[in-house]
Amino acid sequence: MKIITIATQKGGAGKTTLATNLATASAKAGHLTLIIDADSQKTALDWFNKRDNQENPLVIAAENQEKLQNLLNLAEQKGIERIFIDTQGAAAELVNFAMLKADFSLLPCSAGGFDVGAQRTTAAALLQLKKQGAFVITKATTRGQELAETRAILHGLGLPISEHKTTFLKAYKDAAVFNSSVIELEPNGKAAAEITKLFEWLEIKLKKNPLLDQLQQG
């Protein structure tokens, strides 16, 4: 079982969009997948409750650390292979607990640099926990300079940046409206290709040994 936490103090950075789309990519890859909705807004849970396909991925809410831990224990017993934890856009104990439990955390940051201030807090918390993670730039536009500037700012926060990003495509909004994913809605579209590449990159990260990485860097 692998646990991926999606966290950032800034709301609107695309946490739930990443959670639902990556979880769908995971299910398509053959993994029994669960989203734990640890966000008080419960957007991922609402997305799931309105879906026709409720077999894989599954979505369950967790309002506190005890419920989250119980769900993680039960998921392991039931053979869940991938868990995506969608967290609230705030600095909170539950968010830190979710990052502590994760094998890898994704910190989404909207292109343009407006989310960077909030990213400092989340990145610092992840580094203090000594856990693995990376930034993912979201909602990027065709302006290469904006993307480069965002990468440059994030580079100084101590975490790696995924070479894969999501762009500002209508398919993401359409998929949310129809309680779907971009892979389900437009399987051959650009957004589906972005999510597939990001998921494949994430799978590689999950298979790496953190201790080996530390020894190699040392």
Image (spheres, rainbow, N blue to C red):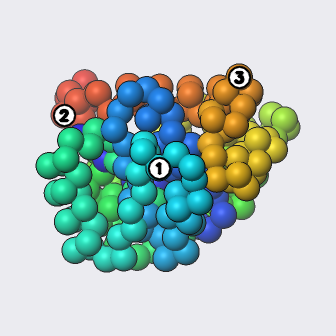
Asked whether, in this view, residue 105 is left or right of residue 101, the answer is right
Mark 3 crowdedness (10 Å alpha carbons): few <14, some 14-19, many ≥20: few
Q: Position of residue 37 (x, y in %)?
A: 43, 64
Q: Which residue ends up furthest to the right in the rendered image?
A: 143
Q: Nearer the viewer, mark 3 or mark 1?
A: 1
- Kind of residue at disc 3: Asn
- Is 204 or 158 nearer to us in this picture? 204
Q: Nearer the viewer, mark 3 or mark 2?
A: 3
Identity of the residue drawn at 47% across and 49% down: 54
- Kind of residue at disc 2: Leu
Mark 1 lies on residue: 54
Mark 2 lies on residue: 211
Label 2 element class: helix
Identity of the residue drawn at 26% across and 43% down: 80
Label 3 element class: loop
What whole-number distance in Å separates the C-alpha atoms at marks 3 and 2? 38 Å
Label 1 element class: loop
Q: Position of residue 86 (x, y in %)?
A: 46, 59
Quadrant placement of the N terminus: top left
Mark 3 lies on residue: 188
* Quadrant of the image occupied by residue 137: top right
Q: Say if 200 sits above or below 94 in the image.
A: above
- Residue 157's tag is none
- Is 192 or 108 nearer to us in this picture? 192
* Quadrant of the image occupied by residue 104: top left
